[in-house]
Image (tube, grey):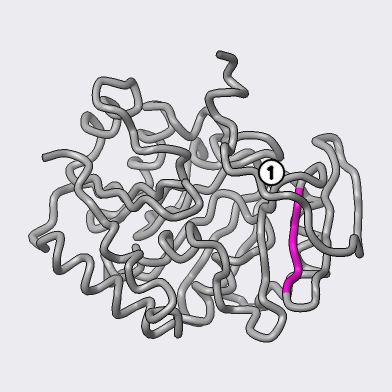
Amino acid sequence: MTNKDVFSNKFYIPPQGDIVCQVTDEYGDIVVADTEDYRILRFEGINEQSKMLKKDVNLPVHQYSKAMLMATTFTSGRPALLLGLGGGALLRALHSLNDQRVVDVVELRSGVLSVAREWFTLPESDKISYYIEDAEHYLRRESIPQYDLIFSDLYSAFSMEPRQGTEVFLRLCLSTLSDEGWLVLNYYEVPRTGSAFHSALQAVFGEVLYCRVPSGNVVIYAARKPHQHTINERREQAKLLLSRLGIGGETGDLSKNITPLFP
């Protein structure tokens, strides 16, 4: 099995909507499509990278985005780092929840940022900074802030960025997390016991949770050190956030999927 096969999104969504914008950079096509209710970002015209509800642009659409947002209840801190912008769904939701939150956004492709600004209603704020840079290069900078939340959502048109599943990457993230910080990572499966990634998570972090979402993605929450909250308390915190977003009734069961990775 090739690396492409291993890291592929197994849940292919046929392209929808009428193409309203298409640009090409050194990495391939960036496509924007419209349906009556949604605006959709795709790479290479294949899988949905991001989806925006036109009548409420701050409401996350994809289940994995909602699962990633649940981590905002795990820490009272504010500064956040987004690795991978896409169409800005996570950024819009974070800003709407707290417009005073400082957010640094790292995106590899300048074309993605340009398209997101033009077509996906990115919030304008002096609290938000954008960096066109490779995520690993950014994490290796000599001087970067400490973050309470790091959201890592690094995907190409066809697969997850393999470095996102390595111990080297996890340790780079740990080095810039605050003492109470959490890494929130969009992964493609529950890390298997005995796998290199499972062992790396156990070696690097003090507490690791995960949430399997209906699309098949798995969101991993990893903290520098263990916390005193029970898993039921975490689920209740997350459920309240979903209700605050107005999606608790629709996806209330999502919070119940938060599970410790290690016994």
Nearest the viewer among 93 and 256 is 256
x%, y% of residue 237?
A: 24, 73
Residue 148 vs residue 80: left or right? Answer: left
Place of residue 231 in the rendered image (x, y in percent of width and height, measured from the top left): 15, 60
Which quadrant holds the C terminus?
top left
Q: Which residue is mark 1?
A: 108
**Is residue 234 part of the magenta span, yes or no?**
no
Q: Main secondary structure of the magenta part?
A: strand
Query: Magenta residues?
Result: 38-42
- Residue drawn 69% across the image and 86% down it: 55
Q: Compare residues 189 and 152 and report the one nearer the observer.
A: 189
Query: Which amino acid, by three-letter code, is at mark 1?
Result: Leu
Q: Residue at x 57, y 36 (%)?
A: 160
Image quadrant assignment for residue 232: bottom left
Using residue 146 as the reference point, say whether residue 128 is left or right of it. right
Q: Can you say which quadrant of the picture contains the N terminus?
A: top right
